[in-house]
Image: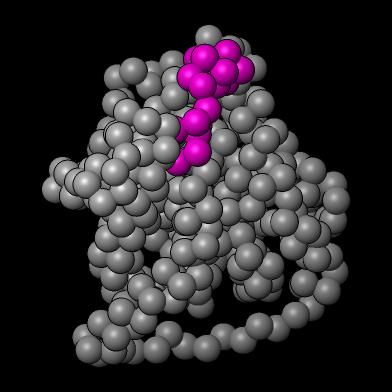
Amino acid sequence: MFDWLDYLVELLITNVFSLSMDSKLGSSIHFFIYDTIKIIILLSFMIFIISYVRSYFPPERTKKILARFNGITGNIMASLLGIVTPFCSCSSVPIFIGFVEGGVPLGLTFSFLITSPIVNEAAFIILLGLFGWKLAVVYVITGVIVGVFGGVIIGNMKMEQYVEEYVYEMKVGTAETEKLTSKERTNFAIQNVKDIIKRIWLYLIIGIGIGALIHGWVPEDFLVKYAGENNPLGVFVAVICGIPLYSNAMGTIPIAQALIGKGVGIGTALAFMMAVTALSAPEMVLLRKVIKPKLIALFVVVTGIGILLTGYLFNAIGHILI
């Protein structure tokens, strides 16, 4: 799909920068420029399409839909809605308050909160462009399973008493969903493209930059030794390393791509990506404003186990996905 871009960037590296594609510097610069342009193109196109669809599903409507379901069906619906109505971890507190105040069961709320940052349309299309449809589809399915698994466990443990009392007393409003014309939805989608690119470009550049450094400079034997498929602790180490970081899926995918290119297991790289987006330390700090430490700990343990299982699964079947 992007062979033309690869060719143009290679010409830029060799003819303008006078660097060899076989050199570490040339390889890193090519990775950085190529992935930056490609991801921005993919993001802009898909954000526009999905934003148009998402104009029918603002947070208020999402909350109303979830409030209708109970049991595992509700957890599945919550995770699926987490895909089409993604929120970054910085939105976790207002979304959590809105759902709980609106009567959405705690387990369903957590299914939504787990899946939403891990799986979204932008992450899917980038995975599709970088790794192919099989890995992209399996990633989405496993992301939903992690959300459903986490939400069911938390819901069945009846942890409502570990939500801060003031959350149940808040009233966040019940504004009706605005009816938009096709032109207004198009304008909304265009503005959303601008807003999202503006909000994530720094994470994207940092992620691609780290990926470029790994791609060009980190020795393959180093990463394979400590995070390769033959290291049974590789996935666990990836999750532990990902938790202190803060980014979104778009910023972590280039890092995962570079890690896989160096011989790291597919599951190990994707487990790292999931940990960064779903279990980041900054998100835990934000969630502490609305839930108590015991519930945060349960959330981390349950989600972490789901991510670990996903990582080991991907490592086991990764050779048939790429």
Q: Is residue 187 visible?
A: yes
Would residue 66 appear left or right of 134 to someone viewing this image?
Answer: right
Q: In this picture, which residue range is highlighted in magenta?
A: 212-229
Residue 290 image-quadrant placement: bottom right
Q: What colour scheme has been applied to the protein in the rendered image?
A: one colour
Would residue 159 appear left or right of 73 to someone viewing this image?
Answer: right
Q: Is residue 64 visible?
A: no
Q: Where, quadrant-wise, is the C terminus in this rendering?
A: top left
Residue 189 image-quadrant placement: bottom left
Please tell me whether residue 233 is drawn above or below residue 36 in the rendered image: above
Asked if the magenta segment contains residue 216, the reply would be yes
**Residue 87, x across and y down, in percent:** 52, 63
Would residue 238 appear left or right of 162 to someone viewing this image?
Answer: left
Residue 319 image-quadrant placement: top left
> Magenta span: helix, strand or loop, mainly?
helix
**Residue 132, x across and y down, in percent:** 26, 36
Asked if the magenta segment contains residue 176, the reply would be no
**Residue 160, x across and y down, in percent:** 78, 56
Marker count (numbered): 0
Would residue 7 appear left or right of 298 to someone viewing this image?
Answer: left
Q: Nearer the viewer, residue 229 or 100?
A: 229
Q: Nearer the viewer, residue 178 or 284?
A: 284
Q: Residue at x 36, y 38 (%)?
A: 26
